[in-house]
Image: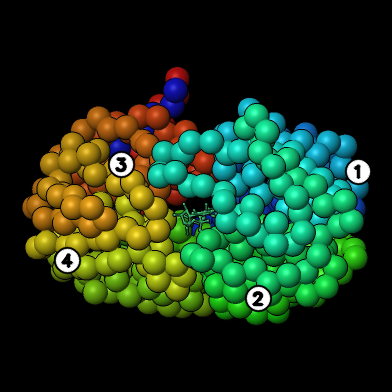
């Protein structure tokens, strides 16, 4: 199993190109199943989760062609995928594939909308809380599907096709909103999604669906309206930049000190996180090429932050912020409201000498003057990268074990950081 070895203490200086967003690329690839024509996606990140979804879609009969690099392409340029779901040959998504990645459950929406049937394995356990799919099922039932659970599979049927309806989510859910949006695009009549998630990745998917001929308004607000159409056609769409990757590198620079240009980043996608970093004493400058992050001389000030749905502070940056606050001058408080149990990084950060107390949903972090490198274990995706951030500022060597989580969501992490002066290498095997 690969590991990452980091020797901490170097400031970061240089440019980090920001990749396409994993959390947009995955639903966009799934949305391609809504049409029998080709959807071309540009700026798709090269990630383990994207490769796995290619296999999952392939199982349904979807053809995917990845266009290789062309002369003149930047080394970090995302890939272009040509996704053609002309013939869907299988409406079952089996356990051994769905259990590896929760988001693959979302294929239930295009399968039901286009084929009027689907049999999709329940996603199963997950490291961060229970993460149920009850709200996705509720949304599909509102659209007229009949669902039952049989031997670990959700079996869904909509013999006469899906019908528009009002879907009101009792809590904000990204997965529920994606599923409702995709299913409603081909439903007969009008659908209203109330209390919809406003995450930029939802807007990106809605934009792409509109290019494919869907009639969606209000994406990016809590009320989305969809006029169902009978068919969607091919289109070409560029995946938006990854706001979580952007925030992660911004926190890495805040942690080590130095000055880094996050090239291609879009500040409006993570304003709340940039505001928190500014409070922490980091200088954020927006320019034509993205965002410049600098911390020169000044220490890190403590902050009090609560995670919330967009435009609030993202849960996917909570672990990274906690790593940063381990070195703040004073006590910080971070409250996690989106996922239960999303504090697995706390015990690993303690191995660096961090002082963190947990009380229910809130962590209190007492900043320490120094962290020391240690062997640590990556748990979930975002927790793993928080260990990298701590290691970059820790004295001595850190070995991050079980890094397959990092490869799921961060493209060429060690290359991007070492290009800015970090001592970081992957050790294979
Ligand atoms: C997505 C993101 C993930 C991010 C999360 C919150 C992708 C691939 N993943 O996850 O990186 O951390 O949004 O921004 O885009 N819930 C239910 N019932 C349901 C569905 C969800 O109770 O049927 C709960 C979840 O357990 C969680 C909360 O709702 O407590 C939010 O989940 P949701 O927004 O759906 O997250 P994901 O789409 O799984």
The residue lying at 41 percent from left, 63 percent from top is 314
Q: CA distance from mark 1 to mark 2?
A: 30 Å
Residue 386 sits above or below residue 186 on the image: above
Left or right: 4, with 352 as reference point: right
Residue holding disc 4: 302
Look at the numbered disc 4 and give the secondary structure of its residue: loop
Circles 1, 4 touching at the beta carbon (< 8 Å): no
SS assignment at label 2: strand
**Residue 89 in which image quadrant:** top right
Residue 87 marker:
1
Q: Is residue 72 above or below residue 285?
A: above
Q: Label 2 vs label 4: CA separation? A: 38 Å
Label 1, label 4: how far apart the Cα atoms are: 55 Å
Q: Residues within 10 Å of mark 4 (few under 14, many from 20)?
A: many
The residue lying toward the viewer, choosing from 223 and 246, is: 223
Q: Residue at x 48, y 47 (%)?
A: 131
Lower sequence index among marks 3 and 2: 2
Q: Is residue 327 visible?
A: no
Disc number lying in front (1 or 2): 2
Q: Is mark 4 within 8 Å of ligand 1?
A: no
Q: Nearer the viewer, mark 3 or mark 2?
A: 2
Determine crowd level at label 3: few under 14, some 14-19, many 20+ residues with C-alpha closer than 10 A.
some
Quarter of the rendering occupied by the N terminus: top left
| Residue 224 placement (x, y as % from top left) | 65, 75
Query: Which comes sooner in the sequence, label 2 or label 4?
Result: 2
267, above or below 159, in the image: below
Label 1: element kind: loop
| Residue 325 percent coordinates (x, y) | 20, 58
Q: CA distance from mark 3 to mark 2?
A: 35 Å
Labels 3 and 1 touching (C-beta < 8 A): no
Q: Position of residue 193 (x, y in %)?
A: 64, 71
């Amino acid at each position: 199993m690969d590991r990452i070895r980091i020797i901490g203490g170097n400031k970061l200086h240089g440019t980090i190109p920001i990749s396409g967003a994993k959390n947009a690329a995955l639903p966009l690839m799934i949305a391609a199943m809504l049409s029998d024509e080709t959807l071309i996606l540009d700026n798709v990140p090269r990630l383990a989760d994207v490769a796995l979804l290619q296999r999952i879609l392939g199982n349904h009969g979807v053809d995917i062609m990845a266009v290789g690099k062309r002369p003149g392409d930047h080394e970090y340029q995302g890939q272009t995928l040509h996704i053609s779901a002309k013939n869907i040959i299988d409406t079952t998504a089996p356990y051994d594939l769905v259990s590896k990645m929760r988001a693959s459950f979302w294929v239930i929406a295009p399968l039901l909308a286009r084929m009027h049937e689907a049999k999709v394995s329940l996603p199963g356990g997950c490291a961060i809380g229970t993460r149920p799919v009850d709200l996705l099922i509720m949304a599909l039932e509102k659209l007229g599907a009949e669902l039952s659970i049989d031997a670990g599979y959700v079996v869904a049927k909509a013999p006469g096709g899906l019908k528009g309806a009002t879907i009101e989510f009792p809590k904000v859910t990204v997965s529920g909103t994606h599923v409702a949006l995709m299913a409603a695009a081909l439903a007969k009549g009008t659908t209203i999604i109330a209390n919809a998630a406003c995450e930029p990745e939802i807007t990106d998917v809605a934009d792409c669906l509109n290019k494919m001929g869907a009639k969606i308004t209000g994406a990016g607000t809590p009320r989305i309206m969809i006029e169902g159409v009978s068919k969607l056609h091919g289109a070409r769409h560029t995946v938006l930049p990854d706001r979580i990757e952007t925030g992660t590198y911004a926190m890495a620079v805040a942690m080590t000190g130095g000055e880094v240009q996050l090239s291609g980043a879009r500040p409006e996608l993570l304003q709340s996180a940039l505001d928190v970093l500014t409070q922490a004493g980091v200088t954020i400058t927006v320019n034509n090429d993205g965002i410049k992050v600098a911390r020169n001389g000044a220490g890190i000030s403590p902050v009090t932050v609560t995670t919330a749905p967009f435009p609030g502070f993202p849960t996917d940056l909570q672990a990274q912020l906690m790593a940063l606050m381990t070195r703040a001058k004073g006590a910080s408080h971070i409250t996690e409201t989106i996922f239960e149990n999303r504090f697995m990084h706390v015990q690993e950060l303690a191995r660096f000498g961090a002082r963190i107390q947990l009380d229910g949903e809130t962590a209190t972090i007492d900043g320490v003057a120094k962290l020391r490198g240690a062997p640590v274990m990556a748990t979930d995706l975002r927790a793993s990268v928080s260990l990298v951030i701590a290691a970059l500022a820790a004295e001595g060597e850190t070995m991050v074990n079980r890094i397959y989580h990092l490869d799921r969501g961060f493209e060429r992490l060690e290359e991007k950081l070492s290009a800015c002066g970090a001592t970081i290498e992957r050790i294979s095997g």
